């Protein structure tokens, strides 16, 4: 009888403890956030993604009433920093800015990651996209993207294009163009944009595919010729630069780089919803949109459902491009 009484007491204590823990957890979520939040930017300080991340951190912090501190954690094409955030406690106090590479490309390429983006990652905010641009030197024989495509059709592999490396956004944007236009161009990979631009300007490359922010002043000044922007719409700041869809006659072409705000997948729904609502409100404000546009990013609010659909579409697209171009890891 004594043993039975003790058993009932133990069960009661465990139940009470469970209820207490649940209540404490619910209370913590209701008070979220009540301390500083860490935002990991997995790229070097001073780059466009870092600068965009700092804009987001400042605006997000003002709306949440807590400081959002940016930490740069560089390495492994962004997956090192994203992995650190996803291995953190799922309490909303550690998040990361994640682009196309750590969100899906590395996984699609079969690289060994410290996380599974399909299981461990929850995207709570869309932070905007930025187009790449196909460019050539201003005295090139090619004045339009259509002329480049026609030349590539006439002689397979004759047109050379440079990018900032194998599986870089510029490389994949060009492979996507090749796939849609049914052409074959020769890829010349570089370790970055600097050496690429030297070879382009000297005539050793026919065209290059680079981030719009890296050549914006050169496009404005007419130092290089813009052949096509990979975004769906023209940039208000460069209204005379056509999109690839327009210039190549490929209405569905779109190949942007983009950023998402991501958390561990097991983060409580209350925190996920609060962050999504806050980011969406932030991205709908003209002041924030203007700040991001100054870096070449265009943003808009997205619900959680819209973000999930966006990731699915992007993953399917880039998976197809990788397969068709037979791009593999070294």
Image: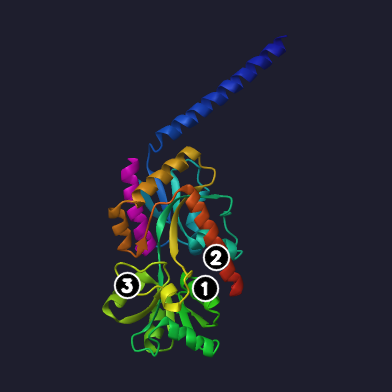
The alpha-carbon separation of the residues under discs 2 and 3 comes to: 27 Å
| Region rendered in magenta | 46-67
Percent position of residue 224, x then y: 33, 81
Q: Earlier in the sequence, mark 2 or mark 1?
A: 1
Residue closest to the eye, 13 or 276: 276
Above or below residue 254? Residue 264 is above
Q: Secondary structure at mark 3?
A: helix
Q: Is residue 286 left or right of residue 258?
A: left
Q: Residue 177, percent across and down?
A: 50, 75
**What element does badge 2 sit on?**
helix
Which residue matches tag 3?
216
* Quadrant of the image occupied by residue 12: top right
**Where is residue 11, by image quadrant?**
top right
- Furthest residue toward top: 1
Residue pointed to by mark 2: 317
As displayed, is residue 223 above or below residue 93? below
Quarter the C terminus occupies: bottom right
């Amino acid at each position: 009888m004594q043993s039975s009484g003790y058993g009932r007491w133990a069960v009661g204590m465990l139940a009470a403890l469970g209820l207490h823990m649940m209540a404490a957890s619910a209370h913590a979520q209701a008070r979220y956030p009540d301390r500083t939040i860490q935002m990991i930017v997995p790229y070097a300080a001073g780059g466009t993604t870092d600068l965009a991340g700092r804009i987001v951190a400042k605006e997000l912090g003002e709306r949440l009433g807590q400081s959002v501190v940016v930490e740069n954690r560089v390495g492994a094409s962004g997956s090192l920093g994203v992995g650190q955030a996803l291995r953190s406690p799922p309490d909303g106090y550690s998040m990361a800015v994640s682009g196309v590479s750590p969100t899906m490309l590395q996984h699609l390429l079969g690289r060994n990651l410290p996380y599974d983006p399909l299981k461990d990652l929850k995207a709570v905010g869309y932070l905007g996209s930025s187009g790449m641009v196909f460019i050539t030197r201003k005295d090139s024989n090619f004045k339009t993207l259509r002329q480049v495509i026609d030349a590539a059709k006439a002689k397979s592999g004759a047109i050379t294009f440079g990018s900032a490396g194998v599986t870089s956004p510029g490389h994949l944007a060009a492979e996507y163009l090749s796939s849609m236009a049914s052409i074959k161009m020769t890829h010349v990979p570089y370790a970055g944009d600097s050496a690429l631009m030297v070879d382009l300007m000297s005539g050793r490359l026919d065209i290059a595919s680079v981030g719009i922010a890296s050549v914006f002043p050169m496009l404005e000044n007419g130092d290089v010729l813009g052949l096509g922007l990979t975004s769906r719409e023209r940039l208000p700041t460069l209204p005379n630069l056509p999109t690839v869809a327009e210039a190549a006659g490929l209405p569905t072409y779109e190949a942007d780089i983009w950023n998402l705000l991501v958390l561990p997948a097991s983060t409580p729904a209350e925190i996920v919803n609060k962050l999504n609502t806050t980011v969406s409100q932030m991205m709908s404000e003209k002041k924030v949109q203007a700040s991001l546009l100054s870096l070449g990013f265009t943003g808009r609010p997205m619900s959680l459902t819209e973000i999930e659909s966006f990731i699915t579409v992007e993953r399917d697209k880039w998976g197809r491009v990788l397969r068709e171009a037979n791009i593999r890891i070294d």
